[in-house]
Amino acid sequence: MKATFMQRLLAYLIDYIIISLIFSLFALSFNTTTLNDINDQINETMNKIVNIDTEKDNLEQLNNQLIDLQYKYQQESKTATAISLLITFVYFTIFQYLNKGQTIGKKILKIKVVNKEEKEPNFLTMFLRTFIVQGILTTTISLLAIFILTKELYMETYVILNSTMSIFVVVCALMVLYRKDRRGLHDMMAGSQVIKEESK
């Protein structure tokens, strides 16, 4: 039996909470004051853009200010992004592989990842699924890009990567929701599927 869309969604939400908690433990060692200050400035600038007073504010100037702040935020959060990538990779690839196709969320919902023959997935399958659908590919490119691209090129690349990833996730979700075999694009690319655990 194929896992339903809701089972997969709930399992992912549980996994997301777990990863967030793990990341929070690492984040305790960060100095987040600078990031919080930049984030406050971003929110303040966005509010000005939304509620712009054309007599007092210049929209182009505010947009440029917002881009500068967003770029600064990305620069300041490089370490946090790298740690987040590592946690995601370890949890969804290594842990899930060692746990025979199950994360904690999948274990709770009694579903698991298998290959096309419904056998235990190999490491490559788990790696490809994580690399594709968990945003590791796009985030890694974005992380590398901040070291080699100018601010303008980086921000354009960042927007394109995030937009592409968002579209990809929506397509995967729709495929899982409407295809008879419940396989998303990431499943097809990795040669995997998600099934219900057999009752013992």
Image (cartoon, rainbow, N blue to C red):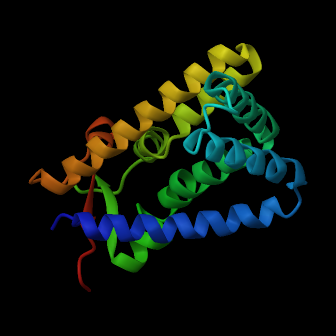
Q: Residue at x 65, y 20 (%)?
A: 154
Q: Residue at x 69, y 66 (%)?
A: 22
Q: Which of the pair 105/32 is nearer the observer? A: 32
What is the count of numbered marks? 0
Q: Is residue 84 above or below residue 15?
A: above
Q: Position of residue 147 (x, y in %)?
A: 76, 21
The residue most toward the left is 180
Q: Which of the pair 189/198 is nearer the observer? A: 189
Q: Residue at x 80, y 44 (%)?
A: 38
| Image-based side of 120 in relation to 75, left or right | left
Image quarter where the N terminus lies is: bottom left
Q: Is residue 13 visible?
A: yes
The residue most toward the bottom is 200
Image quarter where the C terminus lies is: bottom left
| Image-based side of 83 in relation to 174, left or right | right
Q: Position of residue 104 (x, y in %)?
A: 49, 72
Q: Residue at x 24, y 63 (%)?
A: 5
Q: Position of residue 48 (x, y in %)?
A: 65, 42
* Residue 59 in which image quadrant: top right
Q: Is residue 68 above or below residue 194?
A: above
| Image-based side of 155 in relation to 151, left or right | left
Q: Is residue 116 visible?
A: no
Q: Which of the pair 77/117 is nearer the observer? A: 77
Q: Position of residue 140 (x, y in %)?
A: 61, 32
* Residue 100 in which image quadrant: bottom left
Q: Is residue 68 above or below residue 2?
A: above
